Image: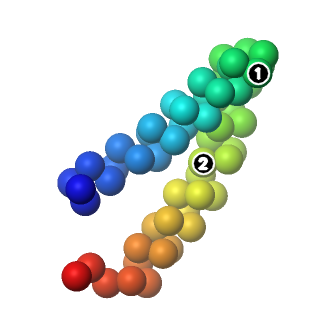
Amino acid sequence: MRNWAWLCPYMMIGLATGVLVLFGLTLWSAFLIALLLVCPAVMLWGAWQGTHPRH
């Protein structure tokens, strides 16, 4: 599963953009909001992965 972990941020951005578009935002504003929401989550995930060694 670790080989596919690089897809997670892109999938998160796509899913968040799709949900925001369904709520009525334009595509570009939804994409910008999704980036602003996903980037901190990816940084926290990276920090978590960096502090816990692989088994």
Q: Residue at x 45, y 38 (%)?
A: 11
Give above or below for 14 relative to 26.
Answer: below
Residue at mark 2: 38
Q: Residue at x 52, y 57 (%)?
A: 42
Q: Residue at x 41, y 78 (%)?
A: 50
- Give coordinates of residue 32: x percent, y percent: 68, 33
SS state under label 1: loop
Disc on the earlier residue, 2 or 1: 1
- Estimate how packed mark 2 is, as few (under 14), some (14 to 19) or many (20 or more) residues with alpha carbons within 10 Å: some
22 vs 5, left or right, is right
Query: Which quadrant of the view contains residue 51?
Result: bottom left
35 vs 14, left or right, is right
Q: Residue at x 70, y 27 (%)?
A: 20
Give above or below for 49 relative to 28.
Answer: below
What residue occupies the far right of the structure in this picture?
24
37 vs 8, left or right, is right
43 vs 33, left or right, is left
Mark nearest the camera among 2 and 1 is 1
- Give coordinates of residue 25: x percent, y percent: 77, 19
Amino acid beneath label 2: Val
The label on residue 54 is none
Q: CA distance from mark 2 to mark 1?
A: 18 Å
Amino acid beneath label 1: Phe
Quadrant where the N terminus is found in the figure? bottom left
Quadrant where the C terminus is found in the figure? bottom left
- Give coordinates of residue 33: x percent, y percent: 71, 36
Residue at mark 1: 23
SS state under label 2: helix
Q: Nearer the viewer, residue 17 or 22?
A: 22
